[in-house]
Image: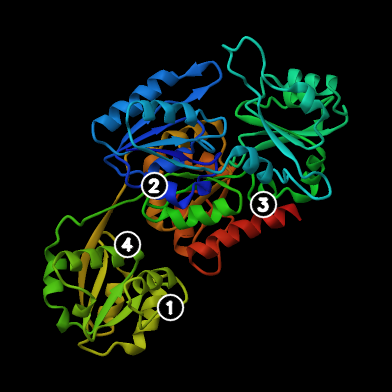
């Protein structure tokens, strides 16, 4: 089976729910240059990923080769997702691929996508139709099949067309497109916009008129992929532009959380307009020895308290409990303490409400919250990382509690920097560095090197989740400019947005 799936024009959030569901169960993914690389993370780890990208003057795989590839993988009995930028049937050659599949007797489905012809102008603040301007919109290719003997674009009709014209893939031919429209009757002062890499964090928009927009685009060094929009609706951009007006637009942020935890911070910062580079400084894996943890699970009934110091600890604890054929009923009458709101939220995902949740994500604050509840002889199970600060267990012991520390996971430092982050470091394209724990600081320094961290911090704004993390940064000669009052991911993201909003005031 082959699914021709429209991936949308750039923003990975624009893929349809059906397209995403199919991608998540694909055995083979065949993708092109215009499909967001972020979407490939949604494919199963075992899926075969094949790049067949095409751009002006460079085809990774010719169209005939793509057709043959789809047929061959399907005939091998595999589920194939052909991931195409925009919509497969809007200047995407999806019709040609579907024809080949039909001729070969291969079953296929078409999953429409959000076409760049509509989405890219929308992200630039340009509605393609508007009652005050036009009720007509026309989509035209800006790059015809070079093997055709003559153009089939009806320039005479387009010159007289009063509506919005959207030319896709037309950067190379911009001067000729504008000349043809003017020669065939379109007012030379008609507003026009050229939008590069629309709906992505690299989006750039230039505006002018049919007379000068080609020169404006050339001066700005606009490059493919880009589209040309012609019509009065372009005037609305100054009022309606929103994608490029967000508080962190144009900022590159380094997120040092583990891969498992980065998603929330990335989502919040990206929503504010930032381009996020994930540089995982922690890889979450099993502890070196499950012995103490398994022993504690066998005797849960003897404990009075179960204490979690991270969402990772909650996930690892529950996974091991479920592996042994048990569920949350095994926790019986245990009282539960969570170090902060994020950890408490992860417990709620399992139907558990923590009895103690201090307002600040800090071992000292959790110890203070537990102090009046601990009686001599209280048995407490601390489910945490294999390597962690000893403040909490030592403080509980001083209060007379019996504390068993059960390592439920181990945080390991990755061995290399992702290539896209390395390229940004070398080019000096880092505006914000974020750190969410002391471990992320230590491991980032190990990964990058102390001197390089100091150099990056000197050209960027450093954001720390709280005072302990800030103290660790200072050990390496880095003083953070941002530290939220609440030590949570949402508070950190909000503090970053507020910092840059104040700079613009």
Which residue is found at the position 64% from the left and 42% from the top? Answer: 118
Mark 1 or 3: the one toward you: 3
Q: Where does label 1 land, which residue?
A: 358
- Would you place residue 265 above or below residue 428 in this image? below
- Would you place residue 95 above or below residue 455 in this image? above
Q: Is residue 57 left or right of residue 409?
A: right
Mark 3 falls on what kind of element?
A: loop
- Would you place residue 495 above or below residue 450 in this image? below
Q: Where does label 3 land, which residue?
A: 246
Ranked by sequence position, the earlier of labels 1 and 3 is 3
Quadrant in the picture for residue 176: top right
Mark 4 or 3: the one toward you: 3
Mark 3 or 2: the one toward you: 3
Which residue is found at the position 78% from the left and 40% from the top? Answer: 234
Count of numbered marks: 4
Q: CA distance from mark 1 to mark 3?
A: 33 Å
- Quick check: marks 3 and 2 in contact, CB under 8 Å? no
Q: CA distance from mark 2 to mark 1?
A: 27 Å
Work out whether residue 203 or residue 49 is closer to the camera in this orientation and state it: 49
Which image quadrant: the N terminus? top left
x, y percent for residue 319 = 23, 64
Ranked by sequence position, the earlier of labels 2 and 1 is 2
Q: Where does label 4 land, which residue?
A: 312
Q: CA distance from mark 4 to mark 2?
A: 15 Å
Residue 277 visible to the viewer: yes
x, y percent for residue 394 = 27, 74
Residue 451 visible to the viewer: no
- Quick check: marks 4 and 2 in contact, CB under 8 Å? no
Q: Where does label 2 land, which residue?
A: 280
Q: Residues within 10 Å of mark 4 (few under 14, many from 20)?
A: many
């Amino acid at each position: 089976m082959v699914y021709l799936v429209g991936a949308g024009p750039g923003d990975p959030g624009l893929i349809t729910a059906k397209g995403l569901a199919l991608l998540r169960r694909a055995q083979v993914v065949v993708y092109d240059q215009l499909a967001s690389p972020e979407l490939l993370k949604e494919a199963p780890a075992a899926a075969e990923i094949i790049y067949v990208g095409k751009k002006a003057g460079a085809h990774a795989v010719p169209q005939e080769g793509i057709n043959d590839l789809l047929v061959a993988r399907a005939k091998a009995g595999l589920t194939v997702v052909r991931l195409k930028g925009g919509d497969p049937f809007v200047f995407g050659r999806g019709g040609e691929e579907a024809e080949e599949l039909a001729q070969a007797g291969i079953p296929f489905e078409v999953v429409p996508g959000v076409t760049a012809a509509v989405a890219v102008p929308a992200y630039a603040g340009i509605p393609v139709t508007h009652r005050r301007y036009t009720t007509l919109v026309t989509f035209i290719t800006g790059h015809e099949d070079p093997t055709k003997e003559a153009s089939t674009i009806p320039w005479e009709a387009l010159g007289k067309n009063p509506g919005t014209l959207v030319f896709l893939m037309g950067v190379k031919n911009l001067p000729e497109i504008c000349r043809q429209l003017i020669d065939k009757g379109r007012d030379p002062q008609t507003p026009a916009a050229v939008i590069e890499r629309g709906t992505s964090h690299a989006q750039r928009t230039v505006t002018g008129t049919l007379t000068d927009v080609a020169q404006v685009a050339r001066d700005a060094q606009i490059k493919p992929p880009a589209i040309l929009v012609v019509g009065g609706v372009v005037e609305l951009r100054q009022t309606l532009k929103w994608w490029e007006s967000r508080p962190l637009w144009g900022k590159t942020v380094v997120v040092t959380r583990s891969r498992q935890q980065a998603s929330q911070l990335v989502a919040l910062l990206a929503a504010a307009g930032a381009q996020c580079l994930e540089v995982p400084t922690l890889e979450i894996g099993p502890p070196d020895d499950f012995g103490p943890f398994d022993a504690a699970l066998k005797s849960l009934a003897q404990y009075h308290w179960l204490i979690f110091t991270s969402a990772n600890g909650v996930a690892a604890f529950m996974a091991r409990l479920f592996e042994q054929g048990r569920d949350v009923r095994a926790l019986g009458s245990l009282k539960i303490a969570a170090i902060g709101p994020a950890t408490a939220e992860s417990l709620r995902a399992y139907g558990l409400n923590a009895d103690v949740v201090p307002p600040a994500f800090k071992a000292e604050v959790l110890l203070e919250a537990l102090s009046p509840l601990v009686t001599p002889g209280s048995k407490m199970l601390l489910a945490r990382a294999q390597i962690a600060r000893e403040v909490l267990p030592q403080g509980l012991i001083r209060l007379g509690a019996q504390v068993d520390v059960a390592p439920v996971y181990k945080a390991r430092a990755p061995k290399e920097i992702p290539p896209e982050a390395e390229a940004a470091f070398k080019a000096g394209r880092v505006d914000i560095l974020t750190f969410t724990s002391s471990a992320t600081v230590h491991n980032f320094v190990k990964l990058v090197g102390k001197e390089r961290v100091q150099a990056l911090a000197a050209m960027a704004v450093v954001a720390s989740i709280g005072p302990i993390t800030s103290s660790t940064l200072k050990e390496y000669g880095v003083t953070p400019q941002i530290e939220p009052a609440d030590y949570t991911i949402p508070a950190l993201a909000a503090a970053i947005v507020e910092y840059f909003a104040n700079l613009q005031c």
